[in-house]
Image (spheres, rainbow, N blue to C red):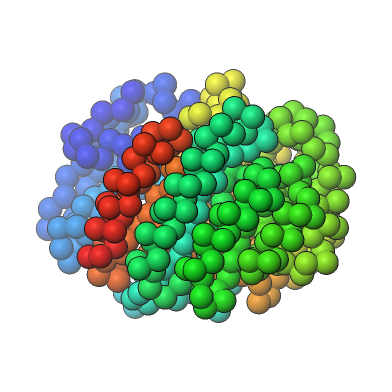
Amino acid sequence: MLTCNEAFLVPELMDVVRLFAGAETLSIEQETHSEGGMFENTVIIGGHARRFSERAEAADALQFKSLCKRYAKLALYIALSEETGTSLPWGALTGIRPTRLAYQELEAGRDFVPLFEQMRVGAENIALVRAVLAGQRAVYERREGNVDLFVSLPFCPTKCEYCSFITAPIAATRKYLPDYLAALERELAAAQPLIGRLRSVYVGGGTPFALEAEELARVLAAVAPLRTNGCEYTVEAGRPDTFTREKLDVCKEYGVTRICINAQSFSDATLARIGRKHTAADVRAAFALAAPYAFDVNCDLIAGLTGESFKEFCASVDEAIALAPANITVHTLCLKKGARLKEETARLEEGELAEMIAYSRSALTKAGYVPYYLYRQKYMAGAHENVGWTRPGKACVYNVDVMEETCDNLAVGANAVSKKLFSGGARIERHGSPKDIPTYLAKVLQLVKERAALFAR
């Protein structure tokens, strides 16, 4: 149990507690006091008090609150690290985008490394952040009027054991599909006047290829009037057991430039355990089927999948590299509420996970890939991260824009979250659509009006 004299800090401090196995059972008291540029924290664990102090100047009340959070979390991290004898790869950083913090330091005229070292981030991850910033250089752009378009298709053949998304097997949701497609057409038509300088389009899911070719064509036809500048256009085709030549033909007809083949693993045993209804051979077949279309291909892998060994994961990395996609993203398994696996496992063991991550970094670097986006989530195994790797010149614009929140994101469909940036990104307002498909369908007209009001500001 954790108590703190400042209630607004408790959620932040609990994020730190959850990093350490068994820490949620400890009795932790934290007292924080800030005055005159001095941030003081006392952490008491099992009757043992540890005192910490840091000096920093805040330009305004917002920055002051941010510094309060930062140093309170750092104090608790150090105390728990000493208590448990455990050091974690990202130290006291619990935010989902370490690169955002790095950019903030650079924009203030400071190197980000001293702050990351203060927050106990490991040297290898500091180097990773520096490499990601370099990998983004060709596509990173913070410019007023830029916007990305996201189209949500929350339909899948089946639901994977680790998945916490709102998707359900399409056999159970297909009855909603005609009305859903009509709703998307309405939303996209209404969105056209709101689009400024379009940077990219991303049709995601779910598994968009779970739709039939003619259904997918309806979606892409509705997108077409909004994409007039030939910008990057991605369809998250998804699971290889949904691939057909007809669906690839539709993508080519409507100018799609990039597709995603979500392999997750090349181990048939692993795929069966996580509820996938395809094999590694099906993944290879999907790559072969897509090859004549000359799309850029993104491929996803997950480290830490149930029962997968270090050797099996390394083999998956090697297979993905051999297929030579434009991007390979290495995710660390994250157990979120809503995933069936979460009901069975409260916390994933570290095991060989660190070695898996290290191998992926080494193998991808040797193969000529560079890291270009990075994010973290709560409940990630081993407190690691997700990293997107790209062949030179093949970075996915949408991934960079979304992870760094450099431009507006206009999102349509169920569970779609639009983001509007103000004051150069200093403030972001969000507009979310209902997760539940019937509720979304009932509220489409209201959603259109609300989104228009937000983007007109």
Q: Nearer the viewer, residue 355 or 287?
A: 287
Q: Nearer the viewer, residue 46 or 282?
A: 282
**Total labels drawn:** 0
State the image coordinates of residue 75 (x, y, percent, origin top left): 33, 44
The residue located at (77%, 69%) in the rendering is 294
Q: Nearer the viewer, residue 163 or 116?
A: 163
Q: Check the picture and name the quadrant holding the N terminus.
A: top left
The residue located at (56%, 31%) in the rendering is 175
- Can residue 198 be seen? yes
- Can residue 400 be seen? no
Q: Is residue 187 left or right of residue 68?
A: right
Does residue 335 lie above or below 365 as drawn? above
Q: Is residue 85 left or right of residue 2?
A: right
Does residue 321 lie above or below 135 as drawn? above
State the image coordinates of residue 344 (x, y, percent, origin top left): 59, 20
The residue located at (52%, 59%) in the rendering is 222
Does residue 457 lie above or below 379 as drawn? below
Q: Nearer the viewer, residue 214 or 264?
A: 214
Q: Quadrant of residue 409?
A: bottom left
The residue located at (48%, 30%) in the rendering is 337
Q: Check the picture and name the quadrant holding the C terminus.
A: bottom left
State the image coordinates of residue 68 (x, y, percent, origin top left): 24, 50
State the image coordinates of residue 372 (x, y, percent, origin top left): 58, 66
Q: Quadrant of residue 298?
A: bottom right
Q: Is residue 165 left or right of residue 161?
A: left
